[in-house]
């Protein structure tokens, strides 16, 4: 069965077609600048040639029509017709407390996703548009939604509750939800296998480090704590996000600069993190380069980024009462050897020993700890699209 995997952003639509029998990627691409001038980028499945088509995309439905047109194109299409698509899997950012696992789309499911939109105003409405577009263009083909938040619904109340009046949780479900759940679930399962223990006995910490970054403590295959909160703003220093700050910072900046709460939150989400600290870039590769060249603010950004990750990993070792495997994943986690080495340097007291030669690698499952290290450390590529494909097959086969 061929599965179409859709990841709709506010102005983007990523897609893959995966053959579920052998889990090979038949086609993949990206629509950008939806609601503006629009463009689609993909590789010709026959020649590997990169193709860029600029075309107006007034909405996600229009973008999906272009995707389908290119997928079935007689010259560079990957499939002959839509009849080859057995089901569609969608990434949805926020499922609130409604969803603790993936589900087949129904009208009730769509209604509940809509009700969670105030928790993810940039993402859930776009996710819904992608789902509805598929339902309209491929009637009768089942759609499955996989939630970023679902994996973390196993967190105990002591981990997800905030120290504010309990009525806010009762009335508004104000709590920590966590994100990157599809990635944390996928990587933690691989890490548990590598631990050599049954998954029910394993203790794994996954560091998903990219433009957005979060850490998850996984015990017995279940999330017990994670660094992102009600929104993806909480937790680590990220590309443009501040991560956790004293809430009074918001009031202080608002008063000093005559800004609204929304304006300050925009600063914390889009102008902070590595970008705000360095004053130069949100891309860790640029920060690394500045650090090597001795730029003081890039050096500060590099060390602050790594320190906050190490501090959170240490907290999660406590939460798990030990750890078998620490796994690094996503763009920075999979490729940035300097970041991994800096983070792990905080754990020599624990008996973690880094294999410097192995740590130079990236892009594959790599053991970067020495054989006599007390904790196994791996770089493990994440594959959210494959995880979505597997869930879609599980629910529709």
Image: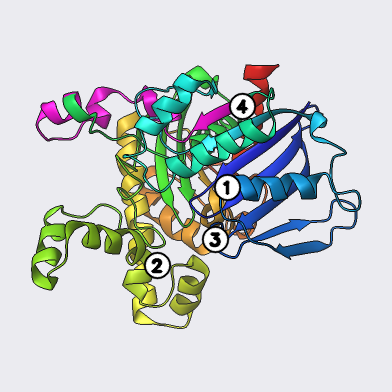
Query: For residue 381: magenta?
Result: no
**Residue at figure coordinates x 52%, y 24% from the top left:** 102
Specify which label sits upstream in the sequence, 2 or 4. Answer: 4
Mark 1 and mark 2 lie on one chain; the one further toward the N terminus is: 1
Residue 216: x and y in percent read 41, 38
The answer, for residue 63, to whether it is visible in the render is yes
Q: Residue at x 44, y 41 (%)?
A: 125
C-beta proximity under 8 Å, tags 1 and 2? no
Range covered by the magenta-colored residues: 144-170
Residue 43 falls in which quadrant of the image?
Answer: bottom right
Secondary structure beneath disc 1? helix
Q: Secondary structure at mark 2?
A: helix
Earlier along the polypeptide chain: callout 3 or callout 2?
2
Give the residue at mark 4.
143
Alpha-carbon distance for marks 3 and 1? 34 Å
Please say if 255 is above or below 94: below
Distance of mark 1 from mark 2, alpha carbons? 37 Å
| Total count of labels | 4
The correct choice, above or below, for 60 with respect to 281 in the image is above
Q: Badge 3 is on which residue?
A: 336
Mark 2 Cα-neighbour bin, 10 Å: few <14, some 14–19, many ≥20: many
**Which residue corresponds to mark 2?**
302
Q: Earlier in the sequence, mark 3 or mark 1?
A: 1
Q: Secondary structure at mark 3?
A: loop
User: Separation of disc 4 and disc 3 at Cα?
Assistant: 36 Å
Mark earlier in primary sequence (4, 3): 4
Q: Nearer the viewer, mark 3 or mark 1?
A: 1
Measure the C-alpha gap from mark 2 to mark 4: 42 Å
Alpha carbon separation for disc pair 1 and 4: 16 Å
Secondary structure of the residue carrying numbered label 4:
strand
């Amino acid at each position: 069965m061929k599965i179409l995997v859709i990841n709709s952003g506010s102005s983007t639509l990523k897609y893959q077609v995966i053959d579920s029998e052998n889990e090979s990627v038949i086609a993949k691409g990206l629509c950008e600048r939806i609601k503006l001038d629009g463009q689609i980028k993909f590789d010709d499945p026959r020649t590997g040639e990169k193709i860029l088509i600029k075309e107006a995309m007034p909405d996600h439905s229009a973008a999906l029509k272009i995707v389908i047109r290119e997928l079935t194109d007689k010259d560079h299409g990957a499939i002959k017709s839509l009849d080859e698509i057995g089901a569609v899997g969608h990434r949805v950012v926020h499922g609130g407390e409604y969803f603790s696992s993936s589900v087949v789309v129904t009208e009730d499911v769509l209604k509940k996703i809509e009700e969670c939109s105030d928790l993810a105003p940039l993402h859930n409405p776009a996710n819904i548009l992608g789902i509805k577009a598929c339902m309209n263009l491929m009637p009768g083909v089942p759609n499955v939604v996989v939630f970023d938040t679902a994996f973390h619904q196993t967190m105990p109340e002591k981990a997800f509750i905030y120290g504010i009046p309990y009525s806010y949780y009762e009335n508004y479900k104000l709590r920590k939800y966590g994100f990157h759940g599809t990635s944390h679930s996928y990587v933690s399962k691989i890490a548990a296998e590598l631990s050599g223990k049954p998954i029910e006995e394993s203790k794994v910490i996954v560091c998903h480090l990219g433009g957005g970054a979060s850490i998850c403590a996984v015990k017995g295959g279940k999330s017990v704590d994670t660094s992102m909160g009600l929104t993806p703003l909480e937790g680590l220093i990220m590309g443009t996000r501040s991560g956790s700050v004293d809430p009074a910072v918001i009031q202080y900046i608002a008063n000093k600069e005559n800004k609204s709460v929304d304006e300050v939150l925009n600063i914390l989400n889009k102008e902070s993190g590595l970008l705000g600290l360095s004053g130069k870039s949100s891309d860790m590769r640029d920060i690394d380069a500045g650090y090597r060249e001795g730029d003081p603010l890039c050096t500060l950004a590099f060390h602050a980024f790594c320190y906050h990750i190490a501090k959170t990993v240490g907290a999660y070792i406590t939460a798990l009462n030990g750890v078998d495997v620490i796994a690094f994943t996503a763009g920075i986690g999979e490729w940035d050897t300097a970041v991994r080495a800096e983070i792990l340097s905080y754990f020599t007291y624990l008996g973690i020993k880094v294999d410097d030669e192995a740590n130079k690698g990236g892009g594959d499952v790599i053991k970067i700890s020495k054989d006599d290290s007390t904790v196994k450390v791996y770089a493990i590529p994440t594959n959210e699209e494959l995880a979505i494909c597997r869930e879609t097959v599980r629910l529709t086969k």
